[in-house]
Amino acid sequence: MPRQIGPVPARIEYTGVAGIVAMLRAMSLERAVRVGARLGTIAAALDRPNRPIAMRNLEIAFPEMDRAARLEIVRGVYRNWGRMLAEWAHMGSLNRTNIERYVKYEGRENWDEGLRLSNGRGAIVLTAHFGNFELMNVAHSIYGNLIAIVHRPLRNPLIDAAVCAARVRFGNRIIERKNGAMETIRLMRKNWHIAVALDLDVRDGVFVDFFGMPACTSEGVARLAMATGAPIVPCFMIRDGASTRHTIAIQPPLELVRGRDRDAAMRENTQRCVAAIEKMIRLHPDHWNWIHRRWKTRPPGEPRFY
């Protein structure tokens, strides 16, 4: 869990963000998204401290690209965040009568297959901090597909509370990542879908291949699926160009390995989860958060490079 900031800096940061959100809310959604993209471009130019992290990550992931191409991806990431903020400002106006104007499903039959395989045992929605993942959570619930979101609290408790409130507005649940195992099992026994973003570096996990380099990854998704028999259904949010239209792309449930060597099976199943995430990032590299230190934790004996 990231260390939360104190009440005074939290209030100052929250007030600044709230002011921008209020400005974007006063515009039409389409205009707000265009303005948000411009704000993202400005942020990309100003955020020099994080640029080396993003460029190092992109060197690992796309060694064939030149520097200019990598910089354009970084700018695209910030534009995506700006558009996300604009859509966040208008999230309260979404409902069942207008959601199809902004979000549609692709591969809905894979969701239905996950329900069939679940047989009442719940399911795991594998996702990442990709595209407008906050809108994806809300859209799922508006469509009636309720999920329980494994949540890692944000550094600012005021912003964290606002994010959680938006996520549960239409019936979703929040599961705190720390000590949330029992709550996860309880909800799965009630046939809930558990959404987990498996694209973050962890200190204690298993090393699997991510863009050709070992990345320390939580094995919790694989262990949960193997213990409960619940299917893992990859699910990602894709923006249509620079527009306000999105597609929730649902992939077929992952085929899991089961064998006598549970540790080997767990590692292989974690690898399959990460491979599904990598596949989507390769298709839409500007949708992912490249300033995250994804390869921070190194195998024993390897030096850190951030």
Image (tube, rainbow, N blue to C red):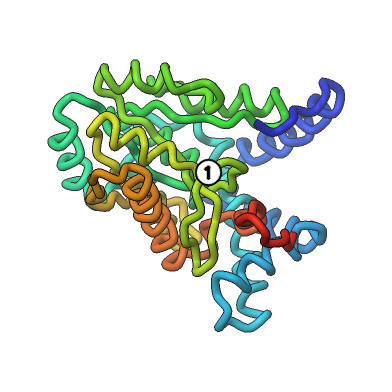
Q: How many C-alpha atoms fall within 10 Å of the one at disc 1: few (<14), some, or many (≥20)? A: some
The picture quadrant where one finds residue 8 is top right
Tell me where residue 16 appears, x and y as whole percent. 78, 35
The picture quadrant where one finds residue 89 is top right
Q: Residue furthest right?
A: 8
The residue carrying mark 1 is: 205
Whether residue 145 sits left or right of residue 92 in the image: it is left
Quadrant placement of the C terminus: bottom right
Foreground of the two, 54 or 286: 54
Q: Residue at x 34, y 35 (%)?
A: 140
Quadrant placement of the N terminus: top right
Q: Is residue 248 something one can see in this rendering? A: no
Whether residue 297 sits left or right of residue 255 in the image: it is right
Q: Residue at x 66, y 54 (%)?
A: 296
Q: Is residue 120 above or below residue 267?
A: above
> How many numbered markers are drawn?
1
Q: Is residue 138 something one can see in this rendering? A: yes
Tell me where residue 58 appears, x and y as whole percent. 61, 69
Tell me where residue 271 appears, x and y as whole percent. 39, 55
Q: Residue at x 72, y 29 (%)?
A: 156
Amino acid found under the numbered disc labelled 1: Gly
